[in-house]
Image (spheres, rainbow, N blue to C red):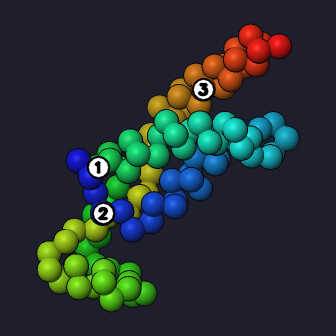
């Protein structure tokens, strides 16, 4: 199911926390893989979304019009930490194995 999510960019911010290396720097290739694997699924999981009861005060006119017409909007707000960590570890392992086989 597809949801009208008003803050889709928050997924990247959330997943970037899972791509921080021991040096405190974001591992961009890992983040790219996390985004590829998880962005769409997270935006399609009702468990990761919060249905808006009211629109933000700065909502654009088109959104207000849709809202008044009955369109429901959602906000991305959380991820299941254990599952994301598991997928991150799997992707990191695959990246290490790919680096070994290419050298």
Pointer 1 local density, CA inside 10 Å: few below 14, some 14–19, many at least 20: some
Residue at (28%, 57%) from the top-left corner? 3
What mark, if any, has residue 91 been given in the picture? 3
- To which quarter of the image does residue 28 belong? top right
List the single residue furthest toward the top: 101
* Mark 1 vs 2, N-terminal side: 2
Residue at (35%, 55%) from the top-left corner? 49
Image vertical order of residue 65 relative to residue 34, above or below:
below
Image vertical order of residue 94 relative to residue 88, above or below:
above
List the single residue furthest toward the front: 102
Residue at (45%, 60%) from the top-left corner? 8
* Mark 2 vs 3, N-terminal side: 2
Residue at image mark 2? 4
Query: Mark 1 against mark 3, which lies toward the viewer?
Result: 3
Q: Is mark 3 on a helix, strand or loop?
A: helix
Query: Looking at the rendering, in which quadrant would you find the C terminus?
Result: top right
**CA separation in Å, label 1 and label 2:** 11 Å
Q: Is mark 1 on a helix, strand or loop?
A: helix
Query: Mark 1 against mark 2, which lies toward the viewer?
Result: 2
Residue at image mark 1? 46
What mark, if any, has residue 29 been given in the picture? none
* Mark 1 vs 3, N-terminal side: 1
Q: Measuring from the top left, give residue 20's x and y in whole percent.
A: 72, 42
**CA separation in Å, label 2 and label 3:** 28 Å
- To which quarter of the image does residue 56 belong? bottom left
Image vertical order of residue 94 relative to residue 64, above or below:
above
Residue at (38%, 50%) from the top-left corner? 43
Residue 11 seen from this side: yes
Pointer 2 local density, CA inside 10 Å: few below 14, some 14–19, many at least 20: some
């Amino acid at each position: 199911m597809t949801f009208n999510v008003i803050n889709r960019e928050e997924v990247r911010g959330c997943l970037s926390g899972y791509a921080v290396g021991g040096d405190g720097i974001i591992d961009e290739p890992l983040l790219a893989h996390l985004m590829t694997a998880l962005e769409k699924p997270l935006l399609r999981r009702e468990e990761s979304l919060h249905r808006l009861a009211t629109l933000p005060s700065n909502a654009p006119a088109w959104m207000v019009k849709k809202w008044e017409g009955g369109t429901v909007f959602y906000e991305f707000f959380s991820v299941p930490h254990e599952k994301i960590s598991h997928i991150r570890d799997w992707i990191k392992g695959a990246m290490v194995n790919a680096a070994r086989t290419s050298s």
